[in-house]
Image (cartoon, helix red, strand yellow):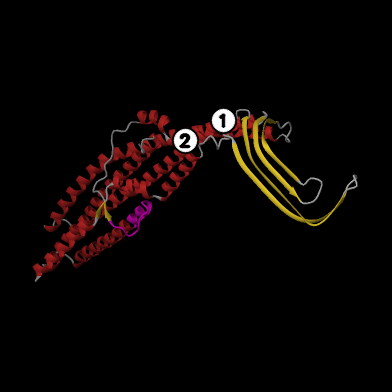
C-alpha cells in the first residue's frame, strides 16, 4: 500500500512538472512585443505619424469643392414702376438655384508647404524613436523580471538543500539526545532551525508566485498563468567600456530622439519665418445659377460659365505675432539643443556607472564562487564532526549560516551583473536590433 501511494505521488509530481510551461527569455520578449499594451499604443501612435506624412497634410495639393443651394418662395407682390406699369399679384412664386465647382491652389507661401512636408517626415522618425524607446524599456522590464524569477528559483533550491541539511542535523541531534550524549536543547534548537527554513521556503514560493504575476502583467496576459524559467543566469563577460561608448553615441535611441527633435524645431522656426512672405493662389470655378420669378422686373435669369484668376494675400501687420512666434521658436530650438547635450551627459554617466557595477559584479563573482566552495566544505566537515560528537550545535549552525550567506551572495552578484549588462546594452543602443 505504501509503495502504491508513493507511485501515485511520483506520477502526480511528474505530471505537474510537464504541465508547467517552460518559458524562455526570448519567448517572454516575443510575447511582450506582441501583447504589451504600452508597446501597442506606441505602435499605433507611430502609425498615425506615418499616415500624417502626406503632401495634402502639408498644404501642397489643391482644394476642390462643390457647392449648391436652392431657395423657393411665395409672396404677395405689388410694384409700381416709373414707366407706369404696375404689378399686383398674390401668391407669386419664385425659385433660385445655384451650383458650382471651386478650385483653389496655393502655389506660393514662402516655401512653407515644403518645409511642413519635411517636418512631417521628421515627426514620423521621431515617433519611431519614441516607439523604440518604449520597446527598450519593456524589454528591460522583461529581462530584469525574468532573471529575478530565475534568481528566486535558485534561492528556493538553496533553501531546499539547506532543509535537507537541517533535517540531517536534526536526525543526528535526536540520536545523540536519545543515547544521552547531548542535551535536549541541541535537539530542540535543531528543530527550531529546521522549522525556520521551512517557513522561509513558504515565503520563497509566495515571492516567486508574485514575481510571475508581475511578469505576466508585463506580458499582458492573465496573472495566474504558471510557467517555469531557465535554471541559470548567463552573463556576458566580454563587454568593454571603450567599444560601448563609441557605439552608444551613434546608436543610442534617446540620443537619436533628441537629434530628431532638434530637426523638428528647426523646421518649426522656418515655418514661422515663411509667414513673412505673401500667399499666392490659383483660383478657378465653374458656376451655374438660375432664377425664376412670377412677378417683378426680372422673370427669368440663367448664368453658366467658368472663370480663372490669381489671388495674393500678404499680412503686413498682425500685432507682431509672427515676430513673437519666431522668437519663441528660436528659444525652443535652444532648449532642444540643451536636451541633446543633457542626454549625452546622461549616457556618458550611465555608461560609466553601469560599467563600474558590471565590473565590480564580475570581480565579486569569482570571490563568491570561491566562498561558496569553501563554505560548503567547511559545513560538510562540521556536520561530520557533529555526527561524531566533536563539534557542537553553535559551530554547525554558524557553518550552515555561512554556507547560506555565500550562496545568497553568489546568486545576488550574478543577478547584479545581469542587470548591469542589460543597462549597458540599452545605453549602447543594441538591445533592440
User: Looking at the image, can residue 180 be seen?
Assistant: no
Mark 1 or 2, nearer chain start: 1
Q: Nearer the viewer, residue 1 or 375?
A: 1
Quarter in which the C terminus is drawn = top left
For the residue labelled by badge 1, is the local secondary structure a helix, a strand or a loop?
Answer: helix
> To which residue does mark 1 refer?
115
> Picture coordinates of residue 157 (x, y %)?
23, 54
> Picture coordinates of residue 150 (x, y %)?
28, 50
Residue appearing at x 45%, y 38% in the figure:
128
> Picture coordinates of residue 208 (x, y %)?
30, 56
> To which residue does mark 2 refer?
125
User: Looking at the image, can residue 113 be seen?
Assistant: yes
The residue range painted magenta reads: 210-226
Q: Is residue 432 left or right of residue 6?
A: right
Q: Residues within 10 Å of mark 2 (few under 14, many from 20)?
A: some
Quarter in which the N terminus is drawn = bottom left
Q: Nearer the viewer, residue 38 or 204?
A: 38
> Picture coordinates of residue 33 (x, y %)?
36, 46
Amino acid at each position: 500500500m505504501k509503495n502504491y501511494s508513493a507511485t501515485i505521488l511520483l506520477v502526480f509530481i511528474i505530471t505537474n512538472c510537464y504541465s508547467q510551461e517552460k518559458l524562455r527569455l526570448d519567448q517572454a520578449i516575443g510575447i511582450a512585443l506582441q501583447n504589451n499594451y504600452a508597446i501597442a499604443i506606441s505602435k499605433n501612435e507611430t502609425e498615425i505619424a506615418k499616415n500624417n506624412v502626406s503632401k495634402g497634410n502639408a498644404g501642397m495639393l489643391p482644394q476642390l469643392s462643390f457647392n449648391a443651394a436652392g431657395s423657393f418662395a411665395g409672396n404677395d407682390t405689388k410694384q409700381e414702376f416709373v414707366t407706369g406699369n404696375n404689378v399686383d399679384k398674390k401668391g407669386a412664386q419664385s425659385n433660385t438655384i445655384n451650383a458650382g465647382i471651386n478650385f483653389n491652389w496655393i502655389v506660393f507661401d514662402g516655401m512653407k508647404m515644403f518645409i511642413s512636408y519635411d517636418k512631417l517626415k521628421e515627426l514620423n522618425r521621431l515617433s519611431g524613436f519614441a516607439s523604440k524607446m518604449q520597446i527598450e524599456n519593456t524589454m528591460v522590464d522583461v529581462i530584469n523580471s525574468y532573471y529575478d524569477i530565475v534568481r528566486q528559483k535558485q534561492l528556493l533550491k538553496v533553501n531546499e538543500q539547506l532543509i535537507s541539511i537541517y533535517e540531517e542535523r536534526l536526525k543526528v541531534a535526536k540520536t545523540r539526545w536519545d543515547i544521552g550524549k547531548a542535551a535536549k536543547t541541541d535537539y530542540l534548537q535543531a528543530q527550531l532551525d529546521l522549522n525556520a527554513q521551512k517557513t522561509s521556503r513558504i515565503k520563497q514560493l509566495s515571492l516567486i508566485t508574485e514575481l510571475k504575476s508581475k511578469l505576466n502583467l508585463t506580458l499582458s496576459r492573465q496573472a495566474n498563468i504558471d510557467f517555469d524559467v531557465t535554471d541559470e543566469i548567463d552573463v556576458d563577460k566580454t563587454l568593454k567600456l571603450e567599444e560601448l561608448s563609441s557605439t552608444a553615441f551613434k546608436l543610442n535611441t534617446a540620443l537619436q530622439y533628441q537629434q530628431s527633435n532638434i530637426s523638428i524645431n528647426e523646421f518649426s522656426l522656418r515655418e514661422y519665418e515663411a509667414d513673412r512672405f505673401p500667399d499666392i493662389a490659383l483660383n478657378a470655378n465653374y458656376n451655374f445659377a438660375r432664377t425664376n420669378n412670377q412677378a417683378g422686373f426680372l422673370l427669368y435669369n440663367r448664368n453658366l460659365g467658368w472663370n480663372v484668376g490669381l489671388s495674393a494675400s500678404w499680412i503686413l501687420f498682425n500685432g507682431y505675432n509672427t515676430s513673437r512666434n519666431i522668437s519663441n521658436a528660436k528659444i525652443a530650438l535652444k532648449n532642444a539643443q540643451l536636451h541633446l547635450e543633457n542626454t549625452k551627459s546622461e549616457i556618458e554617466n550611465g555608461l560609466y556607472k553601469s560599467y563600474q557595477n558590471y565590473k565590480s559584479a564580475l570581480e565579486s563573482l569569482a570571490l563568491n564562487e570561491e566562498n561558496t566552495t569553501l563554505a560548503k566544505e567547511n559545513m560538510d566537515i562540521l556536520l561530520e564532526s557533529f555526527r561524531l560528537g566533536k563539534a557542537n550545535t553553535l559551530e554547525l549552525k554558524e557553518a550552515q549560516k555561512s554556507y547560506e550567506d555565500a550562496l545568497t551572495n553568489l546568486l545576488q552578484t550574478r543577478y547584479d551583473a545581469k542587470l548591469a549588462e542589460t543597462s549597458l546594452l540599452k545605453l549602447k543602443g543594441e538591445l533592440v536590433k
